[in-house]
Image: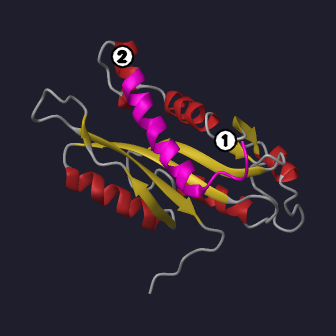
Amino acid sequence: MTGPVSKTTIVETCLNGAVEASRFYDEISGGIQLYEAPEWLLQAEIARALGKCCHYVTVESSVKWLVGAASAERRGCQIRNKRGRIDIVVWSSSDHPRYLIEVKKSWDSWSLYEDAKRLRSMLRRGGKFHAGLMVAYATAAREETLDRRFAETAVNSEAVLVKRLPSMPIDPEDPKSWLWSTAVFEVKKALTIAG
């Protein structure tokens, strides 16, 4: 693999991984949808997709280890949960953690708040970290509910909605089927001040 992988490629690959997770779980479960699956299945399929286009990928990487590997600032305000883990990390060809990615089933607009805080805290330490991303999977009865949930998630977690998949029916054969979608948010080092 030559050169760094673009953020656009990372975002697209995360979304494609979520679609594959949905397809895979539907296939192996006899038709049960992804919202019934454990969150780690979504995480694993996204990591697998990223592994095909990135130098390498790790899952459940220790925060303490990542701060050291990124040559990030260790003094000053301590990371509250050094034993915490980041769901997926995309590494550069020079063996530095580049993208920190959290994956979450988003049941409400506050689901990603703590993940955003942790990613922002790590990004502020500088070093080789390039970006913090959050992948949210959500279901709802109406399109408007998914629109609102993702918009409110961006506001509540103080992140930027980078890209979202179009909503898809959970059961394509049922005209009253609930819908599902996945979105990717970017966490910035500094908080955005609305006003």
- The image shows residue 83 at horizontal and vertical percentages of 77, 42
In screen coordinates, is 8 left or right of 65? left
Q: Residues within 10 Å of mark 1 (few under 14, many from 20)?
A: many
Count of numbered circles on the image:
2
Furthest toward the left, the residue is: 175
- The image shows residue 69 at horizontal and vertical percentages of 86, 49
Q: What are the residue bounds of the magenta stretch?
A: 1-24
Foreground: 131 or 103?
A: 131
- Going by the numbered disc 1, the residue's amino acid type is Cys
- The image shows residue 41 at horizontal and vertical percentages of 51, 27
68 versus 188 height, above or below = above
| Quarter assignment of residue 121 | bottom right
Q: Which residue, given by chain and number where applicable, does mark 1 sit on?
A: 54
In screen coordinates, is 186 left or right of 74? left
Q: Residues within 10 Å of mark 2 (few under 14, many from 20)?
A: few
| Disc 1 secondary structure class | loop
118 versus 189 height, above or below = above
